[in-house]
Image (tube, helix red, strand yellow):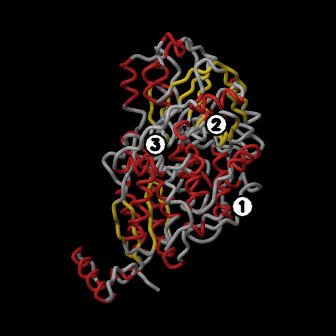
Amino acid sequence: MTRGLRRRLTSYGDQDFSLFLRKAFIKAMGYSDDALDRPIIGVANTYSDYNPCHGNVMQLIEAAKRGIMLAGGMPMVFPTISIHESFAAPTSMFLRNLMAMETEEMVRAQPMDAVVLIGGCDKTIPAQVMAAASSEVPAIILPTGPMETGHHRGERLGACTDCRRLWGQFRAGQLDEAELGEINGRLASSVGTCTVMGTASTMACLVEAMGLALPMSGSAPATSAERIRIAEETGRVAVAMAEAGVTTADVLTPAALRNGLAVLQALGGSTNAVVHLAAIYGRLGRRLDMAELDGLGRIVPVLVDLKPSGVAYMGEFHAAGGVPRLLSELTDVVDLDAPLAFGGTLRDCVANLPPRYEHQIIRSRDNPVSADGALAVLSGNLAPNGAVIKHSAADPKLQVHEGRAVVFDSVRDMTERLEDETLGIAADDVLVLRNAGPRGAPGMPEAGYIPIPRHLARQGVKDMVRISDARMSGTAFGTVILHVMPEAAAGGPLAAVRTGDRIRLDVPARRIELLIDAAELERRMADLPPPQPSPARGYARLYDQHVLQADEGADFDFLTGMPHG
Ligand code: FES
Ligand code: MG
């Protein structure tokens, strides 16, 4: 077997000389022959001063290295891109595929027998799982974990559902600037990922449920001793994984992927996870079946009482038993025979749960947070290939609604005109945003959560029907229809909507309709302006020419399909 430093020798005829050279160079770091003659475990370092969600990565690396060495392996830390939601222009999603490509290629290029991928902020774990799914190297995910909650005048605060709620209060004139400033210092009160069931927590929990990360690793707080111990244990098991040679593609069986969809519904998880899971499916040569996702939502209720669908924060989810506890409530829909990357099956994760206690935030099946799952898939003449809504985090009164469309042509147009009083926006209007999909914006920004216009916010309006080809932050609340497919910039009918049209939403019937006749829609589609030209150079050009629609995970068309060696 090719092991350790012998892996992937770039030999030009003389393998032994290549190994001789490789060892000569690495010995410059002070390693002994004994250290080098062991399974080599790569550890992806995603620390960055721009990424507070990864602020504990150096500590996790130390602990993972300890675990690797205790188990007889040799850790080799290497850098990869780090992406934070607030510091990645034009969008973090635009860069996710770049991180996935870079991670895949660096794992493949450098000699390692297994790899620990440390991720956390929204796009990083998805990028790493996409990379791992396309790689022959056994991989385990080590999430950075959720941040602490803060406190303000007797109230708990957590990024970032409360960021939006309190900003909404400021817009409505209920908070002054001084108080807003105080709050600003308390919303993200430690390193780690957003502490609600946003995209980061959702993805960390999903990788745990799909067998790619250790039990409880999806929820242990970023600053806890338990998180450090999980990092040490992750290092240990990575050495055994190097021996076993099980790849991510082996772990992500159809059953494991379906388990991910079921857990997403029960978590009250982020809509963004649908895009990321679709990309992961694509890497394995499969397609996420939107009908299956919707069908699971009809039989799997939301069980986790966390913001934005519920009331609590990730710390309480962890205390209540985290993903293993949640899986134990879903044994009729989840396949417990699904394999784990580090050996055994999902059944092992639910074998020794502590007893349930009263009032915990992971509810039992007979007492759900909401009877339906978190997400529904809509279709109709406005979204022929589907659209997604997180109806568990929306006003129940708006689930069936008809209203006048008010159309914004781009994110910029929305920003410039949303407060324009001549539009006469009323609470029962339907706000439409287009050209904000994977290609249109580009990078499918989280602009789908269109703010409530100020004059309505001041009247106490908290929710309106909003429709777009954009995404929405997993931490947001509202009747927001997202990922309309195809997007306007790819010739979807969203491009043909005009202000004044009527739009009808019916979530129970899973319909979203533009109320004009088919002939008129066809006429308008034929009259649409030609698409924007591709950017002239660089990654933006690659992105524009190769990005797929949201139902294929907004991955690049040349990255899908089975892994290669
Ligand atoms: Fe990084 Fe929320 S901004 S997890
Ligand atoms: Mg987010």
Residue 359 seen in this snapshot: no
- Label 3 residue near ligand 2, CB within 8 Å: no
Give SS at disc 2. Answer: strand
Residue 481 picture location, percent across and down: 61, 33
Q: What residue type is labelled 2?
A: Ile
Q: Can you tell which of label 3 and label 1 is closer to the viewer?
A: 3
State the separation of the CA atoms marked 3 and 2.
Answer: 19 Å
- Mark 3 neighbour density, 10 Å: few (under 14) some (14–19) many (20 or more): many
Say how many tags the image has.
3
Give SS at disc 3. Answer: loop
Residue 131 picture location, percent across and down: 48, 61
Rendered position, 28 above or below 92: below
Q: Which of 130 and 512 is in front in this view?
A: 512
Instruction: Kindly identify which residue carries mark 1.
Output: 335
Rendered position, 560 above or below 551: below
Q: Which of 386 and 81 is in front in this view?
A: 386
- Mark 2 neighbour density, 10 Å: few (under 14) some (14–19) many (20 or more): many
> In percent of the image, x 33 and y 80: which residue is there?
35
Quadrant holding ligand 1? top left
Residue 322 seen in this snapshot: yes
Instruction: Kindly identify which residue carries mark 3.
Output: 443
Instruction: Kindly identify which residue carries mark 2.
Output: 389
Image check: 525 left or right of 103? right
Rendered position, 536 above or below 113: above
Whichever of callouts 2 and 1 sits on the residue coming sooner in the sequence is 1
Q: Which residue lies furthest to the left in this view?
A: 28
State the separation of the CA atoms marked 2 and 1.
Answer: 26 Å
Q: Which amino acid does label 1 sit on?
A: Asp
- Mark 1 neighbour density, 10 Å: few (under 14) some (14–19) many (20 or more): some
Q: Do the residues labelled 2 and 1 touch (CB within 8 Å)?
A: no
Q: Can you tell which of label 3 and label 2 is closer to the viewer?
A: 3
State the separation of the CA atoms marked 3 and 1.
Answer: 34 Å
